[in-house]
Amino acid sequence: MGWPQWTWLAMMAIGLLIAAHEHGKARTGRQSFWTSAIAAAIHVALLLAGGFFAQAAQAQVPPEAHRYRLTLVREAQRAWGLDAPIAALAAQVHQESGWRPEAVSRVGARGMAQFMPATATWWCAREGISSADCQPHNPTWALRALVGYDLHLYQRAPARMGRYDRLWLALRGYNGGEGHWQAEGRTTGLAAPTRQQIDAACGKARRAPVHCAENLGYPRRILVTLQPRYAAWGPVWNP
């Protein structure tokens, strides 16, 4: 939410606290605490129905993102089809680089998609892209690589799962390597572990447990926290 929403909520809370303080005392007016509470609830419901808070969430999309919206949508639909998880893919770019083509992480990941040099080289070789055209800082290259690599990881997640859980695991693979969650799934001893059971096994194979908070938090932030901000861009994949 933005400052107008927080300001309104603060003012409403103050009003309710004042009404609660006066509750039970002799009144000269006709309004009681319960009248104020009911009025506040109705007010919030009307604002929710009118999109007041949704507009605030969308306002948290970086201004730079809108410049690349059409490119992301085009590349996502080209790779995934018309029902591509565009909102989640946009949220991932938001998480990775804040939509900054020039971004370089402290460990050397580059561009909007934050590909490590070795990953970029492998991806370009896989896709038949020449080294001269392997350009992580090029926005079109980066967005095409991000949606393509996500699809590759998604297709390697268990087909028995729903699309949300497969995307969740794909994002875990993007962040920490798919081999880790696959090995952790095997430690469960189950023939068909659920996504939740695989998550619970984090740190029980090759991955050090200290890295689990980041790896499990990565898909949660993208799909739960950031994805709703991009709902106006395209399909939102929910559980």
Image: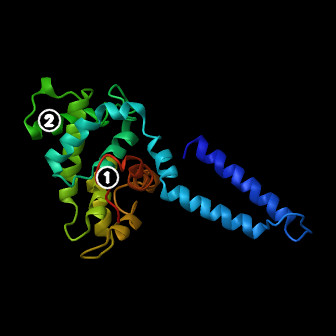
Q: N-terminal of the two: label 1 or label 2?
A: 2
Q: Which residue corresponds to the image point at 75% horizontal and 60% vertical from the top-left?
A: 16
| 201 relative position to 74: left or right | right
Q: Is residue 155 left or right of residue 92?
A: left
User: Is residue 109 visible in this depiction of the protein?
Assistant: no
Q: Amino acid at mark 1?
A: Leu
Which amino acid lies under the numbered mark 2 shown in the image of this protein?
Cys
Give the image location of residue 35, x and y in percent: 73, 68
Identified at 47% across, 46% down, the residue is 55
Disc 1: CA contacts within 10 A as few (<14), some (14-19) or many (>=20): many
Up the image or down, 106 lies above or below 157; here it is: above
Which element carries disc 1, helix, strand or loop?
helix
Residue tagged 2: 124
Residue under label 1, please give it.
Answer: 171
* Structural crowding at the residue carrying mark 2, measured as other residues with C-alpha within 10 Å and reported as few (<14), some (14–19) or many (≥20): some
Residue at the image point whose x is 21% and y is 66% from the top: 158
Q: Secondary structure at mark 2?
A: helix
Image coordinates of residue 151 in percent, x first then y, are: 20, 51
